[in-house]
Amino acid sequence: MDGNREPGQAPAAAQRGDASVRDMIRSLAAQRPCIESAGLIDQLRDAEDLKSAAAAFQARVAVAFDAAQRRAQKSTGVPADELGHGIGAQIALARRESPARGGRLLGLAKALVTEMPHTLAALNTGQLNEWRATLIVKETACLCAADRCAVDEQLAADTGALAGAGDRTIIAAARSAAYRLDPRSVTDRAAHAATERHVSLRPAPDTMCYLTALLPVREGVAVHAALTRHADTLRSDGDTRSRGQIMADDLVERITGTPGGITSIEIQLVMTDRTLFQGDSEPARLPGYAIVPAGWARNAIRDEDAGDPAFTIWLRRLYTAPGSGELVGMDSRARLFPSGLRRFIQARDDTCRTPYCDAPIRHLDHIVPWHDGAATSRGNGAGLCEGCNHTKETPGWAAQPRPGPRHALELTTPTGHSYQSTAPPLPGTGYTGHSGQLPDATESGAGRRSRELRHRAKTLKRPRLTKQSAA
């Protein structure tokens, strides 16, 4: 997300902080690489050990913070089943991670500090890095505390069990130890894992994407075998595509039911009028994916190679303020965000507005709560994922709109630290023309504003996708 600033310090935070940590940071920044190759390798190893030691220190700090927050929440009367809400999100903000990642980091820290002292010691001395410590914790998550301690002792660094081990070796060792100690829990865990099956999408380079399915092993192997068998058949019949290309095309066709995957799905493509009509190179934005090249966006809308257009296109104009790129929109007195305003905020925010969280928008949130008399408006609205919206409603959290070049809000955590979020720039923001020249200084302010507003019109593709013709 664009515009996130460093957390503001809570009152007297500087006095509470440990100056030695910042001293170490400054000392490390002053270090210079050695001249000799052997010395450079030694420095790399020492730096790696330092990273592991820092991760161990963060784990201890996270557990201490969790305990302090739970005591504070309990003293304010928070029900027992709600204790701990929002703690992972605060850790995530401090570590510049997403809220989901923050919760996992807190879980890792508690496991290491309270149940796995040998793994924590190996992390502290650089014999394990944070990722490999995470693998051990993950593979023992189904065990009780006593059995987890037993696995931790079996894999202790001083036994040499993990010397020179890679990720797969560590996973196998931890998993085997868990199987031996508690086979029933491992079996139950496998049965529960099937309930977590899902499909996800994430961007890949060059306007590609990763479509990933987490499936039970039997179904996953069956899907792969069916695609492979069909690809081998077509290859033997003379199909010139590679096996991987055939499998990918077959997957799309089997799921969508149509060649090429054209189905009745609505998507939105945000681009400038210059990109669409004038061949400009300003990239476009595809919600749910990422930034895409201008040429690709034009081709997606105007398929010049096809005899019949694959899409039915509507253009909706969204106007932005000159210079800042702030969307100019609509207000409403309704309790719920009306459909037009919802679409407006989703186009403006793109993903969850919590700093470091780029999850899809699931909730349209009132920054200042509606029950406190705040308006249902574009200025008081923000797109949030479900988890961040629930976190924001827990005691001690607050948010306020703030001035900024584009829509901005400030999030304050229960410790008094503040984080600012600014809406990401829309395509074309800051555009100065092909020559790079600023607008004519002799032009009147009103005339220049009118011209720039017209010039900065954004277009949204809302295709009613129809079946592609057999031709």
Image (spheres, helix red, strand yellow):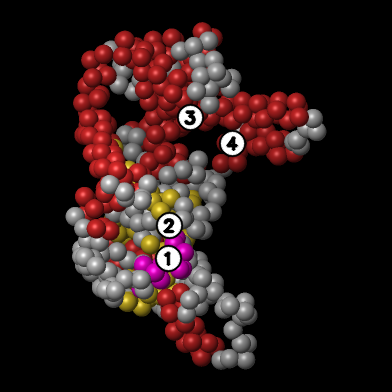
Q: Earlier in the sequence, mark 1 or mark 4?
A: 4
Q: Which amino acid lies under the numbered mark 4 shown in the image of this protein?
A: Gly
Q: Is 157 displayed left or right of 438 in the figure?
A: left
User: Would you say residue 80 is visible in this rendering?
Assistant: yes
Relative to 82, say whether 172 is above or below: above
Q: Please name the residue shown 29% across and 64% down the image.
A: 267
Q: Residues within 10 Å of mark 1 (few under 14, many from 20)?
A: some
Q: Which residues are magenta?
A: 291-302
Circle 2 sits on which residue? 207
Q: Say if mark 1 contacts mark 3, CB within 8 Å.
A: no
392 in the magenta segment: no
Circle 4 sits on which residue? 17
User: Would you say residue 456 is visible in this rendering?
Assistant: no
Task: Mark 3 vs mark 4: give the one in front.
Answer: 3
Q: Say if mark 2 contacts mark 1, CB within 8 Å.
A: yes
Q: Residues within 10 Å of mark 3 (few under 14, many from 20)?
A: few
Q: Earlier in the sequence, mark 4 or mark 2?
A: 4
Residue at the farthest left position? 257
Task: Mark 1 vs mark 4: give the one in front.
Answer: 1
Between 135 and 355, the one nearer to me in the picture: 135
